[in-house]
Image (cartoon, rainbow, N blue to C red):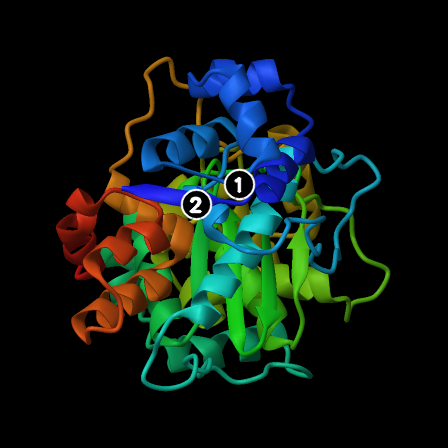
Amino acid sequence: MKLEIDPVRVRALRHRIEMPVQRAAELSGLDPALIEHLEADRDVVEVDVVRRLAKAYNRNWYVFLLDDEPGAPALPRDLRRLSRGAATSDETLIAFDDAELLIDKILDLPRESDVPPMTLSNIAGMTADDAAQLIRDELGATLEAQRQHAAEYDAVRYWSALLTKAGFYAGQLSFPYREVRAFCLRRDGVSLIVVSSRDSPRARVFSMLHELGHLLLGGEAMCQPRSDETSQSALAEEPFCNAFAAAVLMPADEFASDPAALALRGKSLNLGDAVQLARRFGVSELAALRRLATVGVISQEEYERLHRERDEDFSDEPEPSTRPRIRKQATRMINENSRLYATEVLDAHARGDISLREIGVLLGGNLKHVQAIREELRR
């Protein structure tokens, strides 16, 4: 299979990340002269060449099929740029751009009706706990199901599936979570949530629900790594979305009356004492400790003491592994495109609106994984 690619786009993608031609050649295994030719003259090349270049530039290869020149990505409204926060790297900027490209693909996909509307209520003006209870009810989330899917990656799948049914596109892209843990975008009826696939699974779930809060308040945001610096306004959106996410995962009444929570009341706690409680609700221990303070089981002072001991900002990041990470390609294709869009692509093929080959182009992967994608989406 061969494709005609635009030299302006090929050149812009490399210049965007300031990569020398020689380095691009080394990473892609292509001749430097070929890359220079493709950046100067419109030509028809094998798909394998496009795939190699895309991999070298850390992009999905379908980006070469677009007509417009890639420019600076539109940044989400930033509600959380901490004074000590890291600068936004090329990897993060590319993730923003990939998210915009995903929205373009969603809007361009042949469909029988409009983009599915989000079915959840606006929560502006509500308390975090009241908003969380309303949204849990509308999502159909139950503690029983939550605990059945308490294993880390099961929890990501569970909440992603609930958001999918409610009309939200929830994707996972690779970018440094020490810079930005998650962001959300809204355009032309599409509500997109993106979390970092490098973050821990429990943190991804919390970030997903945090970004949901921004969307249900009517906005979009880029949220950097959490800190316990307090806002001067109790009505500020960022702390509200933190409280909302915590309340969705740990409903106040059920959480405060849980036997594992009651056993901690009146005690001087050590780190590790709340692990059992945290596992029952599928959250990190520190998230559980903070919620204990919110519902009055422990004092705010007790929580702050434990927080200082834990050095919380990245306490829930996974331990570094010496083993190479193995991820199923079907899972990658779903995560990068969202469960909702992957489902819509397969539905479009079933209706005869797109070809089998187009599934691979739209989801950024090999056709041999299509059946595995179907099976994963049924889980």
Query: Can the viewer see residue 176 in this picture?
Result: no
Query: 38 or 358: nearer the eye?
Result: 38
Residue at the spot of label 2: 4
Q: How many marks?
A: 2
**Residues at marks 2 and 1 touching, judged by CB atoms closer than 8 Å:** yes
Number of the label disc, if any, that sits on residue 42? 1
Quarter location, residue 341: bottom left
Looking at the rendered structure, the secondary structure element under dot 2 is strand
Expressed as whole percent of the image width and height from the top left, the position of residue 316 reads 50, 35
Query: 274 or 157: nearer the eye?
Result: 157
Expressed as whole percent of the image width and height from the top left, the position of residue 346 reads 23, 65
Query: In screen coordinates, is 325 left or right of 248?
Result: left
Query: In screen coordinates, is 180 left or right of 111?
Result: right
Looking at the rendered structure, the secondary structure element under dot 1 is loop
Question: Which residue is located at x 64 percent, y 49 percent?
Answer: 70
Quadrant of the image containing the N terminus: top left
Q: Amino acid at mark 1?
A: Arg
Is the residue marked by circle 1 packed among few (<14), some (14-19), or many (20+) residues within 10 Å?
Answer: some
Query: Can the viewer see residue 213 in this picture?
Result: yes
Expressed as whole percent of the image width and height from the top left, the position of residue 35 reads 53, 25
Question: Which residue is located at x 53 percent, y 41 percent?
Answer: 42
Expressed as whole percent of the image width and height from the top left, the position of residue 183 reads 60, 55
